Amino acid sequence: MGRRYYCDYCDVSFPDSKEGRRKHNDGLVHQKMKDAHFRQFADSRTRLAQELQKTPCRRFLQGIPCMFGDDCRFSHLWPYEVEQLRYSAQMEEMASVKLPSQLLKNEQPIEDFVKRIETLVKEKEVEATKSNSQAWSQFETTENVVRSTCVIHFTTRIENMVLRHIRAKLNH
């Protein structure tokens, strides 16, 4: 009987041969099934970009069933659904956070960060003594200095470690 090739996208099997696979993979049904498979895993930003490029489907907006369904080249989303997709894309953008190990590869070492904080503290002290103003009042504690200059994506653990180090330096 021979070996059979099973296509996961199309849920079909056929005799396995180089020519048979090539013919199947180049087929329109396979291409559409493969696109539909990957479309379900697209993130909101990608889906939003695709939907904003399309014009609304007239038949869909009139309440008439579109014979093309998901393969229609026009958009099948109502305006409120586009807004929901836009909101979802914004939430995904805000939630995309790098792992600390990824951040440390591109970031400066903690020692350099601590030195930078210390120089900022000294600069603020000099400014406060020179101008006799309340410039330092917004930075009364070392914690506020670190939080105001710390890059948002530093983790709480690293921030606490830096704070302990700065407190130890300031106490000596």
Image (tube, helix red, strand yellow):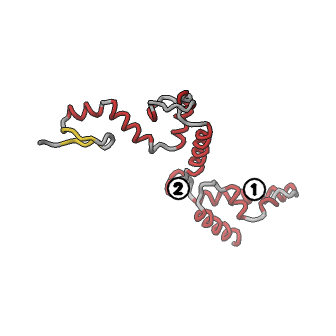
Q: Residues within 10 Å of mark 1 (few under 14, many from 20)?
A: few
The amino acid pointed to by label 1 is: Glu
Of 25 and 82, nearer the camera is: 82
Q: Position of residue 108 (x, y in %)?
A: 57, 54
Q: Above or below — where is 11 with respect to 108?
A: above
Q: Above or below — where is 99 with respect to 40?
A: below
Q: How many marks?
A: 2
Taking the spot 82% from the left edge, 60% from the top edge, the residue there is 137
Taking the spot 70% from the left edge, 72% from the top edge, the residue there is 171
Q: Position of residue 128 (x, y in %)?
A: 83, 58
Q: Which mark is residue 28?
A: none
Q: Residues within 10 Å of mark 2 (few under 14, many from 20)?
A: few
Taking the spot 71% from the left edge, 64% from the top edge, the residue there is 143
Q: Position of residue 118 (x, y in %)?
A: 69, 60
For the N terminus, the image quarter is top left
Q: Which quarter of the picture shows residue 86?
A: top right
Q: Is the C-beta separation of discs 2 and 1 under 8 Å?
A: no
The amino acid pointed to by label 2 is: Leu
Q: Above or below — where is 37 with respect to 104?
A: above
Q: Position of residue 20 (x, y in %)?
A: 21, 33
Q: Secondary structure at mark 1?
A: helix
Q: Which mark is residue 104?
A: 2
Residue behind mark 1: 123
Q: Left of 66 or right of it: where is 138?
A: right
The label nearer to you, 2 versus 1, is: 2
Q: Which quarter of the picture shows residue 133?
A: bottom right
